[in-house]
Every structure is written in structure tokens, then in C-alpha cells.
Image (cartoon, helix red, strand yellow):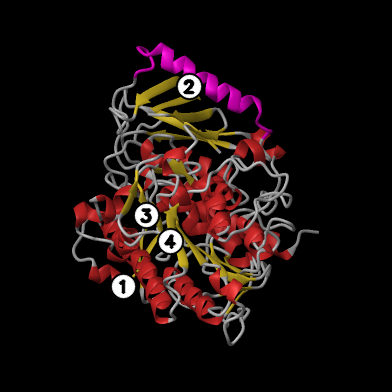
Amino acid sequence: MLKKSLIILLLVVIVLAGLAWLTRVDILLGLVKFRSDREFVVAPNTAVPWEKGPQEAQSEAQQRLPNIILIVADDLGYNDISTFGGGVAGGRLQTPHIDQLAEQGAVFNQSYAGNATCAPSRAMIMTGRYPARTGFEFTPTPSGMGPMVSMVSAAMDNNGLPPGVFSDAGSEAAVSYEEQGLPAAEVTIAEVLRDKGYYTAHIGKWHLGRAAGSTPNAQGFDDSLLMASGLYLPEDDPNVVNAKLAFDPIDQFLWARLNYAASFNNGGDQRFEPGGYLTDYWTDESIAVIKANKNRPFFLYLAHWGTHTPLQATREDYEAVGDITPHRLRVYAAMVRALDRSVGRIMATLEQEGLAENTLVMFTSDNGGPGYLGLPDVNAPYRGWKLTNFEGGLRVPLFIKWPSRIVPNTDIDVPVAHIDIMPTLTAAAGAATPPGVDIDGLNLLPLATGEDAEQWPRTTLFWQSGYYRAVRHGDWKLQISERPKKSWLYNLAEDPTERHNLAATRIDKLNELQTLLDKHDASARAPLYPFVVEMPVAVDKTLVDYFESGDEYIYWPN
């Protein structure tokens, strides 16, 4: 006998199918929303019972250990940070608090994401290891997202862009969304710091698994306030301004699939409403963690959701940024304003609590800004977007402030990447590298402090997502792909915005970098789970622009 919920679902399908004015997309998304709204009970907001440290400062040795705060933005465009001379909407919105953090410490002018999409970057931040070692190569997607987005995309006018490809075989071979996580055997920076005597707290996005062994608590965090879904505020909240992207099938899926929910310490099924606009709420709770643990060394990983879609801003921020057009850009600018405010509030709290001098604060983003926002300047002047290995997809800010060790206005031009964060924080805490673990990243402190900076030993960085791979060796960068089957070779010293493909004329460099990629690939372990979709991405146009014959594009396997 059919369950009651299934009967209701069938009735909904029948009713929706009978409404001739509804499109196939409307029906599909309506079903997604119907299921999502009934999947979990979301309780009212509740106070978070953070662990509290001692009332007085502890031993002198513990007082010497620096507090560590790692702030990671999501999908923040390189040009959105006014540190680099840009700013949202042609510089109309500046980021003064993030700029101040940069000015008071070290700025890495050639900093790269671990991957052009979020979860693999976050895995590399946590472990200091490439996907070639961990197998964590693709971003986990909620159940049904791949086929649903493919169906929505197929029913839309995609402005001439080639169609996406969904793999039924890959989908059948994949484990559940909850189980697509970082293996328990991997050693995270949270585990290293916890073993050194740090209190460790995670707030916000995780995206590295929700099953046993891969949750934040299982991966070294004493406390974890998790982003359990993905709305910044309820869609109908009187204080929210929404911007839906009718041209983006992923955005349409997210509006149907997500709700407004958080959970605490492995309570994935025990969800409650956050206490306000998500960016501000995560900041409120971060400040609570700092104040509760100021008398012992702490590690706070603040993993913001901003500025990832769905685009939602508070009405106050929306009004504050002024009459920016189009509407989606104004909402986006307001979201960047909230993110910048968060950084300012964290820094002010450290000053007020007398912790600023011996607290290391690091700021980065998980990858470049996406083209599916329909905003052409988010990664200017670089080509490409999130979901491409062009500089626009991989260039991210990386700033480190540590007043007791790093002098203000330190600029570093050496190429660095997310794999370097874990060994850097390990060294800052005076902790030992995990025994028996091969770490691909390097400690950045010699560069940031000027100590032995001339001895920087690395010349090569790698990126991979299925058949689409890239390598930077010295000033040269090579991308290779099977769909389309093509190579892109650039000398970044002469052509940092990747305008002149030298693959046909510099065969010597092409072969040299191809050999490096092949060697890296030969020693790689298989991915933990297969990719299930191949998404077309125009390199030079946003998703709102019409794709014409001759425009460059890639497919991103995930």
C-alpha cells in the first residue's frame, strides 16, 4: 500500500499536470519544493551552547600560542575586493574592513584556489593535500540535483550554449550526498590544532560530508554550528530582498530545494532557524566563540555562505549600496557589504578583548566568482569563472594578519594555493606535521615574515576535475580537456589574463607541462565517487549572454 506522503505527491503531480499554463520546469521545481519543505522539521531559533574556556588565562606556554581565525568566503569574485583596485559595480562598493585586514598583514598577489569549485578547495584547505592523494575530487551535490538541473536546463533556452550531459551510470555508482565526504582517515588542521591544546570551532558551510566519520565533529572540531540548508533568510521575510536568476537552472533548483536552517554538533536531523540574516548570524556566533574562549588558544573556522547563490540581502544593505543596476548586481553588492561587515566585526572584537596582537587571521575564498550570476566584472581582469581553470576561476584573495609576527603592507608575488593553509597554520601553532602523512602544501610564514623567503622550494601547482586538468610551472600554465579536446598554454608573466594561447607555437613548453601533468596523474588515486554531470561553461561570457559560434567554452565534470 502506498505511503500517505507518496499519495499526496502523486496528487500534486496530477494537479500540476492539469494546469496547462504551468511549464514542465514549473512542475519539476514544484515537486522539489514540495519534498524539501517536508523533509525536516525546522524548530525555532535556539541559543547555541558553545563550550566555554577558563575564566582566567592559563599557563604561560598556552598564552604564547596564537589564536587562529580562518575566514573563507564562498564564490567571492577576485574583483569584488577593493584591495586589488576593483570593487563591486565598477568600484561603487568598497570593502574597507577586508582591505584593512590586508593592509595590516601579508597579501599574496598570486594566490590560487585548490579547485575551481567549492568542496575540493575546502578539502585541500583542511588537509593540505591534493585530490590525487585524498580522492576528494568532485563537489558533493544534493540527491537529485544532477538530473533535475539537467532537465531544467534542457527545458530552457540556454542562449546557444551547448547542452549539459548527465551520466546515469555515474549517478548509479555514486554514494549518497551525506556519504560523499572527506574520509575519516584524513588528518585535518582542526585535528592537528586540537591535539596541540586548541579549542576548535566550526561555523557555517562544511560540504565535506555528513555521514559518520566525515562531519566537522568527527574531523577535529569540538563544536560545529552547521549550515544545514542554504537560504540566508526565509524567502518571504519582511527584511529580505531576493534576486532570482531565471536564466540559471542551478539557481532555480536552489530556490526550490533550500530552506532556512542550521544544526549544532552532529544534530543534522535536529534543525533550527538561524538567528537572523545568515552572514550576520554566523558573525554573531563567531564573536560568542571568541569571547567564551579568550583565555585559552582557539581555532575558529568561519566558513561563510556569502556570496553564493541564492542571492539574498537584507533590506538595510540593499538600501545602503544605492541605485546599482541591474537588480541582481545591487543584491550581490549588498551581500558583499555584509561579508565585509563580518570581517570588520571580528577584527573589532579581537581588539576589544585584547587578543589582536597574538591572533592570526587568514581570509580567502573557495574559488572565483561564477559566470552564472550574469555579472561580467566579478573576476576582472581575468578570464573565466568558477567551474573553469582559467585565472578567473582559480584566483582568490589570501591575506594573513598576525601583528606579533607579520609587518603591515607585506606584498608577496610567489604563487601559492589553498594546499598551503594547513601547513601554515600547523607551523604557526608550533605543532608537528601528522606522522606518516604526505602534505603537498608548504608553510607560508617564511614568505609572510621575510625569514628565508628566498628559499621557497616549489615551482609547480596542479588542478584537476576529471578529464579537465591544469598545471602551473614557473610562469607557464597549461590546461587540457577532453570536452572539447583542446590545450591552452599561457605565459602568465607576459599574458596574465590568458589572451594568447601558445599551445600551437610553443610545443616545447606544451610537452614539458604535459609531462608534469601525466606524472602527477600517474600517481593519483581514483576519485572517491564518479562525476555525474558535465556542465558547459562559456569562458568569456556570462550565462545571461548569448553564446555564438566561435566562443570558447569548456565542460566541467562534477
Marked residue nearer the N-terminal end (1 or 3): 3
The answer to whether residue 530 shows anywhere in this view is: no
Proximity of marks 2 and 3: CB atoms separated by less than 8 Å: no
Q: Please, what secondary structure does the residue beneath circle 2 have? A: helix
Q: Nearer the viewer, residue 408 or 13?
A: 408
Q: Amino acid at mark 1?
A: Arg
Q: Which tag is nearer the camera, tag 2 or tag 1?
A: 2
Marked residue nearer the N-terminal end (4 or 3): 3
Q: On the image, numbered disc 2 is attached to which residue?
A: 513
Cα separation between marks 1 and 4: 40 Å
Q: Please, what secondary structure does the residue beneath circle 4 have? A: loop
Q: Please, what secondary structure does the residue beneath circle 1 have? A: helix
Q: Which mark is residue 405?
A: 4
Please give the name of the residue rendered at 31% of the width and 38% of the height, measured from the top-left corner. 382
Marked residue nearer the N-terminal end (1 or 4): 1
Rendered position, 134 above or below 291: above
Q: Amino acid at mark 2?
A: Leu
Q: Position of residue 53 (x, y in %)?
A: 61, 81
Residue 510 drawn in magenta: yes
Please give the name of the residue rendered at 23% of the width and 60% of the height, measured from the top-left corner. 93
Disc 4 packing (10 Å; few <14; some 14–19; many ≥20): some
Q: Amino acid at mark 3?
A: Ala
Q: Quadrant of residue 361?
A: bottom left
Q: On the image, numbered disc 1 is attached to which residue?
A: 315
Proximity of marks 4 and 3: CB atoms separated by less than 8 Å: no
Proximity of marks 1 and 4: CB atoms separated by less than 8 Å: no
Q: On the image, numbered disc 3 is attached to which residue?
A: 106
Q: Quadrant of the C terminus?
A: top right
Q: Nearer the viewer, residue 154 or 496?
A: 496
Q: Position of residue 270 (x, y in %)?
A: 66, 72
What's the magenta region?
Answer: 502-526
